[in-house]
Amino acid sequence: MEHYDFIALGGGNAGLTASKRVKAAGKKVALIDPTPVGGLCALNGCNPKKVLVRAVEVLHLVREAGEHGIRTGEVKIDWSAVIDRKHRFIDSVTESTEKDLRDAKVDYIKAPARFTAPDRLEVDGRTLSFDGAVVATGSAPRRLSFPGADLVATSDQILEARTVPSRLAIIGAGAVALEFAHVFARLGSNVHVLNRGQEALKGHDRELVSRLVSHLQSLGVVFHNGVEVKAVEANPTSYDVQLSDGVKVGADLVLNAAGRPANLEGLCLEKAQVQYSEHGVDVNECLRSPGNPRVFAAGDAHGARELSPVASYEGAIVAHNFLHGEERRVDYSAIPSAIFTVPPLAAVGLTEDGARKQGLDVEAVTQDMSEWTVFRIAGEKLSYGKVISEKGSGRIVGAHLFGPAADDNINVFAMAMRYGITSERLSEMIYVYPALASAMRFLT
C-alpha cells in the first residue's frame, strides 16, 4: 500500500488548483483522472463555446456594418473553419496540463478510482491511502430516459459539428441551452427550445430574462414551455421529437442541454462514509464532508456553483483547509456569471425577489439604456440594467445586465459587493467616456 498526503480526484480547475497548492507546500500529492485532464471549461465548455459565440458575434457586427457607413457584400460563414479555430485553443490543453503536473511534481494517474475505506482508494489494482482527498470529478450530461434518448447529442458532440443543422431541437432552457440556441439561430437554423418548466433561466432576474427570450424569439427561436419529451424517433435523414402536449418537432439534430449533474458514478463514496445526493457531494461551508472530514469536494462535484472560476476558488480553499486547518469558508455572495448570447446577460448577487424573500428592505433601479448615447454610438439596440441595493446603507446586493459588454461591466458590481463599495460611491466614480462602462454610474 502506498501513502499520499493528499489526493485529488479529477483534473479540472478544482483538482488542479488544490493538488498543485498542496504540493507546493512540500506534501506528497497525486492527481487521479481516467479522462483527459484540463477540465470541462477548457476542453468542452466555456472556452470552445465562446469561440463559437465570438464567430456569430463577428457575423452580427459585419451584418450591422451599414449602421456605421460600411458597405459589405454577401456575408458567409465557413463553420468548419470555426471548428478548426476552436481546436487551436483546445487541442494542446491536455498535453500542457500534463506537463504542468510533471513540472509541479504531482503524480498523475490516468485510471478510474474508487474508495474502499474512509482513508483509502483503489486505483488500477493499487491501494492508496491518504490524509486528505478532494472529490473534484466534475459533471456529466444528464441521463435521459425516454425512448430514443440514445439518439440525442451532447454538448461535446455539437461542439464538433462541422455543418450547421437546418433544424435544431434543444432539450432544456438553462444557460447552455440558450447559448447554443442563440448561436445556431444566428447561423440560420430553425431552433426549438423544449422546456419542462414555464420559464427559462431559473434563478435569474425575470424582467431581463424576458428581454433575452424576446430577443431570441426575434431571431426565430421557438420556445415550448411546460412540456416533456416523450420520445425521439429517427427518420432516414432527420428526427421527430414527440412532446407531451402532442406537438411533434422535426430536427436534424437534437441536443441534450438538460443540465449536468455531479459525476460521482463508480466512486463508491459510501465506503468512504461520504454523503451525497443527486445534487452532488454534501459539504459544509469549508467544503469538507460532514461524514468524513478528511474528504473534501469542490467544483461541479458538489454542484453549488457550476462555474470554472468558482472551481478554482474552491480548490484554493480546499488546499488551505487541508494544509492549515484554519477553516476558510466559501463566500458566494459576489460571484458574477454571464450567459454568452449577443448581447450577453450577466448577473451577480440576489434578484429583487430573492432579496425581498430574505427580508431585506431594498430598492431596485431598472433602466432601459438602449437610447443612451454610448450605446447608440456603438450601434447597439438592446441594453438594460437593474441594480438592487439596501435602503439606507446603499449596500449593493445584486446587479443584472442585458446588453453589450454586460459580461465585462458586471465585474464593476461584483467588485463593489465584495469590497463594500456603496451605490452612492459607484455613482461618484469618474469613468472613461464614452466607454460603455460609463453608463454603469447611472444604474445606482
Image: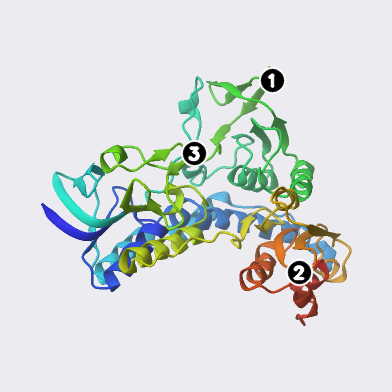
Left or right: residue 366 versus residue 349 is: right
Q: Answer few, some or many: residues within 10 Å of disc 1's Cα (few below 14, many 20 plus, some between 14 and 19).
A: few
Residue lying furthest top: 246
Residue 343 placement: quadrant: bottom right
Residue 91 seen from this side: no
User: N-terminal of the two: label 3 or label 1?
Assistant: 3
Per the rendering, the mark at residue 247 is 1
**Residue tagged 2:** 393
Residue 68 placement: quadrant: bottom right
Residue depth check, mark 2 versus mark 1: number of the one nearer the observer: 2
Q: Residue at x 55, y 53 (%)?
A: 49
Residue 195 seen from this side: yes
Residue 25 point in image, percent of width and height: 28, 73
Left or right: residue 124 versus residue 97 is: left
User: N-terminal of the two: label 3 or label 2?
Assistant: 3
**Residue tagged 3:** 154
Amino acid found under the numbered disc labelled 1:
Val
Nearer-the-camera pick, 428 or 422: 422
Nearer-the-camera pick, 37 or 13: 13
Amino acid found under the numbered disc labelled 2:
Ser
Question: Vertically, is 202 above or below 335?
Answer: above
Quadrant of image for the C terminus: bottom right
Amino acid found under the numbered disc labelled 3:
Thr
Q: Alpha-carbon distance for marks 2 and 1?
A: 52 Å
Per the rendering, the mark at residue 62 is none
Residue lying furthest left: 1
Q: Answer few, some or many: residues within 10 Å of disc 2's Cα (few below 14, many 20 plus, some between 14 and 19).
A: few
Mark 2 lies on a secondary structure that is loop
Residue depth check, mark 3 versus mark 2: number of the one nearer the observer: 2
